[in-house]
Image: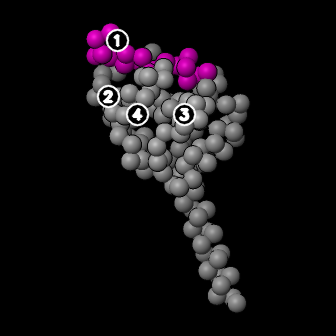
Amino acid sequence: MNSREELEKLLRRLLGTGRFEGFPRHPDHLDSILAVAACQLHRRRPYGEREVNEALSEWLQSVNSPVDHVTLRRRMVDCGFLKRTTNGSRYFLNYGRVAGVLGDPALEVDAGAIIDDLHCEREERKRARMDESAAR
C-alpha cells in the first residue's frame, strides 16, 4: 500500500457490506486485510496462543466478522504475518511482513471505524431517499 488513502479505499471496498465477510481471493487484498489485523499485536513481544486469540477475537468483533479467530490466526501464520516457535507455544508479530504490505512505519487503520462510517453513510443515504420520496 502506498498511502493511508489507498488502504482506506481498499478496506471500504472489502468491508462494504458493513462487516468482514471472509478472506479475499486477490493475494494483495488478502495481505492488506491480514496486515491490518496483525497491527493488533506489538512488535518484539512474545504472545501465548490465548493472547493472540484474544487480540484477534477483538479485531474480528470490531469488524462484525463471522470468521473465527483460529482461522484468522492460522491464515496469518500461513501468510507470514505471525511467526511461532517450533513447539508452537509462542507467537511473534512478523513486523517486516506487515511493513512490507503497509509501509514502515506501518499504517494503522481502524477497520471498525471504517465500518461505522459505512453504516452512517448508508443511513444518511436512506434518510435522503426517504426525504426525497416524501417531498414528491
Residue wearing tag 4: 72
Q: What's the residue type where badge 4 is placed?
A: Leu
Quadrant assignment for the N terminus: top right
Residue 80 vertical position relative to residue 14 in the rendered view, above or below = above
The reply to whether the C-beta atoms of the residues labelled 1 and 4 are less than 8 Å apart is no
Q: What's the residue type where badge 1 is placed?
A: Thr
Residue 96 vertical position relative to residue 103 in the rendered view, above or below = above
Decide which of 98, 79 is in the foreground and name it. Answer: 79
Decide which of 63, 25 is in the foreground and name it. Answer: 25
- Residues under labels 1 and 4: Cα distance? 18 Å
Residue wearing tag 3: 30
Residue 42 visible in the shown view = no
Label 3 neighbour load within 10 Å: few <14, some 14-19, many 20+:
some
Decide which of 22, 6 is in the foreground and name it. Answer: 22
The reply to whether the C-beta atoms of the residues labelled 2 and 4 are less than 8 Å apart is no
* Residue 135 falls inside the magenta stretch: no
| Residue 127: mark in rendering | none
Query: Residues in magenta?
Result: 81-100
Residue wearing tag 2: 51
Q: What's the residue type where badge 2 is placed?
A: Glu
* Residue 94 falls inside the magenta stretch: yes
Give the structural element (helix, strand or loop) at label 4: helix
Quadrant assignment for the C terminus: bottom right
The first of marks 1 and 3 along the sequence is: 3
Residue wearing tag 1: 85
The first of marks 2 and 4 along the sequence is: 2
Q: Quadrant of residue 96?
A: top right
